[in-house]
Amino acid sequence: MGEALDRLDGAGWHVLHSVPFPGGDRVHHLAIGPGGLFAIHSVYARKQRVTVADPMVTLGRRDACPLLRRVRADADRASYALTAEVHPVLALVGPTDVRITAPPREVRIIADTEVESLARLGGMLKPADVEALHAMARDRHTWTRV
């Protein structure tokens, strides 16, 4: 997933990987670009069926877990730290099938092959705002207050 996100760099996007929160939690990927800010939680789902019923996510034959709550919470913490709206994204790596039985509110669900769809989003942030938010996100002190 990181490699797919890194390809967005040429389109005016910046991506930070494994952004640490106090207490040991982390945002897997933080994408900042013209389309806005996205906290991306990636899940390895290679050759598995994924079923999403807000807030539960089921991978293959495993038990369902409330993963979408964590995705939203990570985006909320990043929003608080950056003082800007951060959108939650669940990125599925290599799923065979994705079934959404209850549409998730506020969470965008993408496969690793659909990362370019984020680059097509635009009109939310000016280039100067993207650079300022990227500089703020790179500062380690930003994340100590969440």
Image (tube, helix red, strand yellow):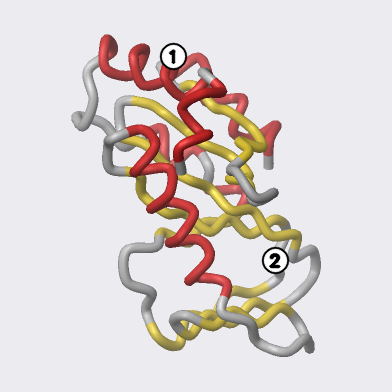
Q: Position of residue 57 (x, y in %)?
A: 59, 79
Residue at left offset 28%, top offset 35%: 83
Q: Position of residue 89 (x, y in %)?
A: 47, 54
Q: Amino acid at mark 1?
A: Ala
Image-based side of 61 in relation to 19, left or right: right
Quarter of the image with the N terminus in it: top right
Front position in the image: 111 or 83: 83
Residue at left offset 48%, top offset 33%: 31
**How many marks do you count on the picture?**
2
Image-based side of 127 in relation to 17, left or right: left
Q: Position of residue 109 (x, y in %)?
A: 48, 61
Q: Is residue 134 above or below residue 57?
A: above
* Image depth: mark 1 or mark 2 in front: 1
Front position in the image: 98 or 21: 21
Residue at left offset 77%, top offset 86%: 62
Residue at left offset 32%, top offset 71%: 105
Distance of label 1 from label 2 (alpha carbons): 34 Å
Pointer 2 local density, CA inside 10 Å: few below 14, some 14–19, many at least 20: some
Image-based side of 129 in relation to 81, left or right: left
Q: Is residue 95 above or below residue 42?
A: below
Q: Amino acid at mark 2?
A: Pro
- Label 1 sits on a secondary structure element that is helix
Residue at which label 2 appears = 95
Dots 1 and 2: beta carbons under 8 Å?
no
- Label 2 sits on a secondary structure element that is loop
What's the mark number on residue 135?
A: 1
Q: Is residue 92 above or below residue 15?
A: below
Report which quarter residue 127 is drawn in: top left
- N-terminal-most mark, 1 or 2: 2
